[in-house]
Amino acid sequence: MKMPKAVIFDLDGVIANTVPLHYVATKQVADEVGVPFTYKMNEAFQGRNRMEMIRELCEGLDKSEEELIRLGEKKNEYYKELIATISEKDALPGMIMLMKELKEAGVLLAIASSSSNAESVVNQLGVSMYVDYLVPHHKVTHMKPAPDIFLEAARFLKVNPKECVALEDSQAGLEAIRAARMCAIAVGEAVKEEGADLHITSTKSLNVSSILQIYTKFIAKDGEIRK
């Protein structure tokens, strides 16, 4: 069996249990402007950038661009207050151990998150020592579902995209992985199984062995990597 050279993680909903925090922060903004916001809607917004979400949330409210930016900043401030309280216990089951074991196996690790607060979350979780590259937003022209953020991770790590396994919990993220032509693992029930090389409902079932197996199948199906 063959081990990938790099594993690229989304952050919210893959490593960190922060999706509920996004919901709380966005719900506060939605309540202030008087629009409904449900947990199901929050799931649909995962993987998309903040301003895109705010524009859709306020569609039909006749808000100026300045007002929308202010609401986006307010949502971010609410979210930053919430993530300041998280710790290692807020990592999803098995993910810190998985990162540790992948590093010990010589696999490069990157985080490809749409969140501008990704570095803060990584530090709060105590996993920064495992991360070789956290993709900065200024390096990415188009956010998910465009493949840019995953391709930037591969470029920095100096690996072929086909030598990467990437994990996502959102439909936009999964589409981005497929567009980057990487081995795709879909995490959770909010993302459809179609298009993923492996779909898991819980991170508990993910380990180095399962990544090794699915990547070996991916390479066999996709043919030899062209250098």
Image (cartoon, rainbow, N blue to C red):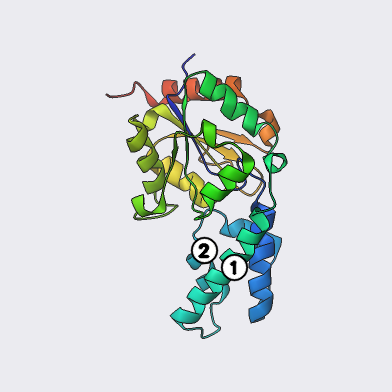
Q: Nearer the viewer, residue 140 or 193?
A: 140
Residue 39 lies, in percent from the top left, at 70, 60
Q: Nearer the viewer, residue 16 or 183?
A: 16
User: In the rendered view, does 77 fall on the left or right side of 137?
Assistant: right
Residue 24 seen in this snapshot = yes
Q: Nearer the viewer, residue 15 or 147?
A: 15
Q: Mark 1, residues whose alpha carbon is within 10 Å: few (<14), some, or many (≥20)?
A: many
The residue that appears at 57% across and 55% down in the rendered structure is 46
Residue 207 lies, in percent from the top left, at 62, 25
Q: Which quadrant: the C terminus?
A: top left
- Camera-nearest label, 2 or 1: 1
The residue that appears at 65% across and 61% down in the rendered structure is 81
The residue that appears at 66% across and 79% down in the rendered structure is 32
- The type of residue carrying mark 2 is Arg
Residue 197 seen in this snapshot = no
Q: Which residue is mark 1?
A: 75
Q: Quick one: SS at disc 1?
A: helix
Residue lying at the far bottom of the rendered structure? 62
Residue lying at the far left of the rendered structure? 227
Q: Is residue 50 above or below residue 92?
A: below
